[in-house]
Amino acid sequence: MEPPAILKTSRLVLRPLETGDAKALFGLFSFPEVTRYYEIDTLRNEAQALLLLEHFLACGRHAITLEGRFIGSCGLFAFHPEYHSASLGYDLLPECWGKGFMSEALCALLDHGFSSLSLNRINALVHPENIRSIRLLERCCFEKEGVMREFGFWKGAYHDMSLYALLKRHWDGCRKSLAQG
């Protein structure tokens, strides 16, 4: 898999994750509020962060940077070229929540996915109690398609996951309304 493209917004740069990002990933995933609805445990050391980084590098994940500082990551993965579809994942430092950074990053990533990667559909799985993430997806015009009962298993329990999706034809109109504010 080739590395992801560098994407720029008015405030952010989305660049390919690098091997030197392990410490920043550890900082991000050491917050219990970041991993609460995630299938990984809160990281306790940088060795765990290195394993996560290896996984993210294999998936072609982007680092989200603000003025050169790592604030989160996002990416498209689980590509199905025959169906022109992929899945979406993202995470952000808690200090950056509520400031529009992830909406901005996802707009750039979704635009890239639909235009440069010729995707027709992008999926996202979200825990039904993760209201911030659900609102983010809805702001980006994703529609809830259903609930996958006991689809996830982490922290010793099964979890339902809501399936959201965005189609290219809906993104084209949504992008214009998001750009207008």
Image (cartoon, helix red, strand yellow):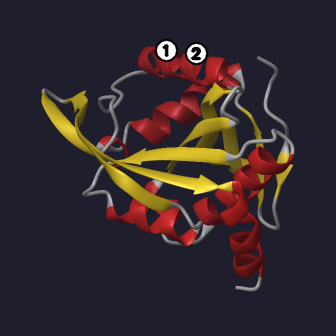
Which residue is more in the foreground, 108 or 177? Answer: 177
Q: Horizontal placement of 58 versus 156: left or right?
A: right
Q: Return the residue found at the far left.
A: 157
Which structural element holds mark 2? helix
Which residue is more in the foreground, 141 or 73? Answer: 141
Which residue occupies 57% across, 67% down?
Answer: 141
Which residue occupies 79% across, 32% down?
Answer: 4
Q: Horizontal placement of 142 versus 42: left or right?
A: right
Q: Horizontal placement of 28 versus 140: left or right?
A: left
Q: Position of residue 95 (x, y in %)?
A: 48, 61
Amino acid type of the residue that numbered disc 2 sits on in the rendered structure? Glu
According to the picture, the residue beneath numbered tag 2 turns out to be: 54
Q: Residues within 10 Å of mark 2 (few under 14, many from 20)?
A: some
Which residue occupies 34% across, 29% down?
Answer: 40
On residue 51, which mark appears? 1
Check the picture and name the quadrant holding the N terminus: top right
Q: Position of residue 73 (x, y in %)?
A: 60, 42
Q: Return the residue found at the far bottom.
A: 180
Q: Position of residue 80 (x, y in %)?
A: 64, 27
Check the picture and name the quadrant holding the C terminus: bottom right
Count of numbered labels shown in the rendering: 2
Amino acid type of the residue that numbered disc 1 sits on in the rendered structure? Leu
Quarter of image, res 177: bottom right
Instruction: Kindly check if marks 2 and 1 are in contact, taking CB atoms under 8 A apart as contact.
Output: yes
Q: Inspect this view and state whether residue 66 appears.
A: no
Which residue is more in the foreground, 90 or 152? Answer: 152
Quarter of image, res 166: bottom right
Which structural element holds mark 1? helix
Q: Position of residue 56 (x, y in %)?
A: 59, 25
Q: Inspect this view and state whether residue 52 appears.
A: yes
Q: Residues within 10 Å of mark 1 (few under 14, many from 20)?
A: few
Q: CA distance from mark 2 to mark 1?
A: 5 Å
